Image (cartoon, helix red, strand yellow):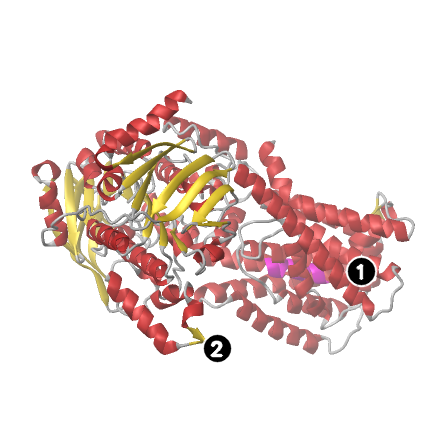
Amino acid sequence: MSLLQATGITKRFGGIVALKSVAFEARAGEVHAVLGENGAGKSTFIQILSGAIAADEGSLSLRGQPFAPKNPREAERAGIAAVFQELSLVPDLTVAENIWFRREPLTWFGTVDRRELLRRTAWLLGELGLTKIAPDRAVRHLSVAERQVVEIAKALAGDPDVLILDEATSALPPQEVDWLLAIARKRADAGKLVLYISHRLAEVRRVAERMTVLRNGETVGTRTTANLSDDEIVTMMLGRRLDRLYPERRVTRTARVALQVEGLTVGHRLRGVDFSLHEGEILGVAGLQGHGQRELFLALFGATRSQGRISVWGKPTVIRDPHHALSAGVGMALLPEDRRLQGLLLSKSVRENLILAILPRIARHGLLDLRREGELVADAVRRLQVKVSSPEQLAGTLSGGNQQKVVLAKLLATQARILLFYDPTRGVDVGTKAEIFVLMRDLAAQGYAILFYSTDLPELTHLADRVAVLSYGRVAAVLEGQAIDEEAILRATLAERQAA
Amino acid sequence: MRAGLRGMGPLLAPAAILLALLIVLAALRRGVFTLDELNTDAAAAMTLILVATGETIVILRGGIDLSVGGILSLATAIAATRGAAGPLEMAGWAVLILVIGAVVGMLNGALISVLELQPFLVTLATWSIVGGTALIVLPSEGGAVPGWWVDAGAGTFAGLSLAVWSLAALLLWWAWFRRTRLAASIRAAGSNERSAFLCGVALGRMNVAAYGLSGLFAALGGLFLTSQTGSGSPTVGNDFVLPAVAAVVIGGTVLSGGRGGLAGSAVGAFILTIIGNVVFVLHISSYWQPVVAGLILVLSVLATSLGELAMARRDAAL
């Protein structure tokens, strides 16, 4: 009956036990959710299933047969395909080359049959309803959401018996989430197994019949989703009750304008945006994927060319580049879209990541002041409660939520007073999300001005003082106070669409 | 069609530089756009092109191979001590030389993957070891290859020199190679090693293949060089290491791996060769020649990077 079974799986990384005798069982024909806080061991477990790392102890069985994949290739041959949280696409290959990588159709010269490759890709993308993605485009030109979709198409190309989706929706806009959930459902109905890892309970509820919760590397239990309330699930994950996800709304906005933007334009993606961001305010930005929010954030940070007028604390300013944005004169910091690519140096220690942005402040006569550096790092780690064994731990070995905390700590260490948060809770667990929200509210209360984009509408409605809705590169509406709700935001995005 | 043109994009800048250099050269002396000139330039550039071929593969993978210097020297040293060999015997020696080159390269690849060492250091070490071996085989410049070997090197077929035919064969080989799974794995690993691993690339085997090919092409370069000079030199390879890397980079292959190709490297090798010609016909003091050559090189690299910037802009606008 059970398709995939794990018993006594244990994995250690150095002195840290990531998994402690994990037991797991999933059946053919179900969508099975795997839940847990950051660092609970979900990613490690998935990586063992997909052959990326080997377990120290314990055994797996697949269709009743013992199964111990030595590398991702063996797992793939056995019928397990994973969509990893860390994207596994090769940026310099095209969409088609990536999807069929190492499974390319060959001509009888031993070369890749490009025509067949493109034909198959077009067929696959068509079958999945992804006609907007060009098979011959290099992956590095795609947006994060498009990459995620290609990654999913790639996993599906081999028609696997077990499909593992690790936080696959964290980079997807709402329509694509619906698309993915429908695919997961369809595969389960066809007698396949889908393992669904997500921090979003609403999605888990919509798609998964059963769920297994991990906590601190151990299995808490497997339950039927419909029998549990959200509170009960969160309690299972945390081992305690989480009082509330969102902090209480306090109005800390002052009359002082931190950032005044007029007619900001970037190519044809952002077409004349006006808004003002006040001291002590969290200004939400909403919009469907690709409606200019990315360009807006990059332009404000000086990372892309733009036209229009920007005033910072009342002073007209032309932001030349990110270095200028971060400088004391401007004081603006960006939490980027993809922390793994843009926000963190994964192969460097937490300490090195933290000090990178503030080198001038801890340097004395051109030399690093090591004592001052130690203090600042310890302070940042404490302030954000980053779970690290020591500041020397490599950033790449941290869980998603802890990585995001390091990025945040880095941002705060710059002493910028205007913070640009681009989807700060992407791939972050419930516990850390709550911490980030509290932190944002506190920062606002301290007089920071925060521009906050999120793909998750409830975050905007609960956290933002005002929400600017972008549509086709323009501000379609600015909602305030009681007027902010999910329906109003959606209506604003759609209204502009009909007019356009 | 569109994909084909897009693939050609990075070649435009180096090709334009090469053309500009040729035009400058034509203004200074006669006979630049003739078959003879093509034959001569190809012969002058071919050794560098062969070494750069191997280097292109290794750089696409995100590595670097310095040992090509030693391998090239050793190849000429062995060939130059076989002056009396008949055609069949010489063919045997040529095969042996190629095998030695490939084996040294494969060892590089194995050391890099098994011991997880830096390619720079591993190949620096093998450069020294193999270069030293060349000195043992042939202690000083000289020796001789069989006379017919040199004749073949100077021979022409249908008006085109051996070098031109070799270049055509090489480009044909590349047209095949770049479409193989191995080439895709190499590019993938150079683009993002972790992704490539997760996608099932056996990194160890791929490294052995990539560095093995590099060693093989360096040995081939050595054999070609002896057909032009008629003699060997235990240190000649050292003059090819950095120019080979330079040819690859000028040709648009990214030093961090993943993007690029042989056509660009060949153009890069021609650029480096023609710069020498231009400086020569300028009739300036020989002390100044390297200075001027360096300045032209800077301009060329600048043009390449401006070209790439324009491409990136266009892509961003899409």
Instruction: Please give the residue where the numbered disc 1 appears in the rendered image.
Output: B276
- Residue B108 position in % (x across, y down): 54, 65
Q: Amino acid at mark 1?
A: Gly
Per the rendering, the mark at residue A490 is: none
Residue B302 % position (x, y): 67, 54
* Residue on which disc 2 sits: A365
Q: Nearer the viewer, mark 2 or mark 1?
A: 2
B98 left or right, relative to A374: right
Q: Position of residue A59 (x, y in %)?
A: 20, 54
- Up-down relation of residue A404 to residue B316 (above or below): below
Residue A295, picture quadrant? top left
Which residue extends farthest top? A498
**Image position of B169 (left or right of A40):** right
Residue B216 lies in the magenta stretch: yes
Residue nearer the viewer, B214 or A356 = A356
The residue sitting at the front extreme is A255
Q: Does the rendering let one see residue A212?
A: yes
Residue at the spot 80% in from the left edge and 69% down from the top edge: B144
Disc 2 marks which amino acid? His
Q: CA distance from mark 2 to mark 1?
A: 46 Å
